[in-house]
């Protein structure tokens, strides 16, 4: 259920009723209707309005990938995506990847390969990897590294991240 705009410092504060817009977005398979300021990013809508805090705010400039989600199946940085522009779209966050209590193959592979240290980038890495697998363009570890280059891991867990993606691709029958 959407919360009223009340968080101090959020992108939706101090919006007159005339300026607010209503948007309906599918989030992890559930329709969500929000009344938000036109400048509210998808990231802020997810975190501040829907309490989906798995998606992280890293740089807030689209450079680190911590905020990556799937938008209609494609990976996007949610900090640069205006929520009002995605009316009717389907968003999948890290919270929506598991199914009926079973981890997504990427989530399990990240655990199996210890592909995280501090964990801050993990949700963005996993969502980006899910999009990468769906795109079907990565056929080697080098291609995985290149196509994941928009997601930064400050802890340097890159070899483990690549290994996890390779495992998930194999488990999903997608090569590498």
Image: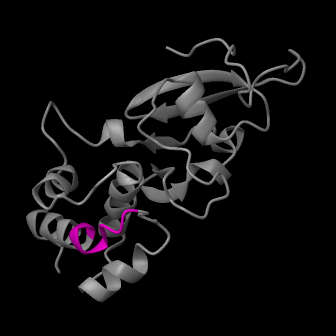
Reply above or below: 35 against 144. above
Dividing the picture into quarters, in which one does residue 97 lie? Answer: top left
Give the position of the C terminus as an image quadrant.
Answer: bottom left
Say whether residue 160 is magenta: yes
Rendering coords of residue 164 (x, y %): 19, 65
At a point 46% along the width and 66% down the height, the residue shown is: 152
At a point 20% along the width and 56% down the height, the residue shown is: 110
Write down the region rendered in magenta.
155-161
- Number of marks in the rendered image: 0
Of residue 145 and residue 89, the one placed in the foreground of this image is 145
Dividing the picture into quarters, in which one does residue 143 lie? Answer: bottom left
Rendering coords of residue 23 (x, y %): 66, 29
Of residue 43 and residue 169, the one placed in the foreground of this image is 43
Reply above or below: 156 against 23. below
141 sits to left or right of 94: left
45 sits to left or right of 39: left
At a point 37% along the width and 59% down the height, the residue shown is: 125
Say whether residue 143 is magenta: no
Dividing the picture into quarters, in which one does residue 135 lie? Answer: bottom left
At a point 33% along the width and 63% down the height, the residue shown is: 129
Reply above or below: 78 against 49. below
130 sits to left or right of 19: left
């Amino acid at each position: 259920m959407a919360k009223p705009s009340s968080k101090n410092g959020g992108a939706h504060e101090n919006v007159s009723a005339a300026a607010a817009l209503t948007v309906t977005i599918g989030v992890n398979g559930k329709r969500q209707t929000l009344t938000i300021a036109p400048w509210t990013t998808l990231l802020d809508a997810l975190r501040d309005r829907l309490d989906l805090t798995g998606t992280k705010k890293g740089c807030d400039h689209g450079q680190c990938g911590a905020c990556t989600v799937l938008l209609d199946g494609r990976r996007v940085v949610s900090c640069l995506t205006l929520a009002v522009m995605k009316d009717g779209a389907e968003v999948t966050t890290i919270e929506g990847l598991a199914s009926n209590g079973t981890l997504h193959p990427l989530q399990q592979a990240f655990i199996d390969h210890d592909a995280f240290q501090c964990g801050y980038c993990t949700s963005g890495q996993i969502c980006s990897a899910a999009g990468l697998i769906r795109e079907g363009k990565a056929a080697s570890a080098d291609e995985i590294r290149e196509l994941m280059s928009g997601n930064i891991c400050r802890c340097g867990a890159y070899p483990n991240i690549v290994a996890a993606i390779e495992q998930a691709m194999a488990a999903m029958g997608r090569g590498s």
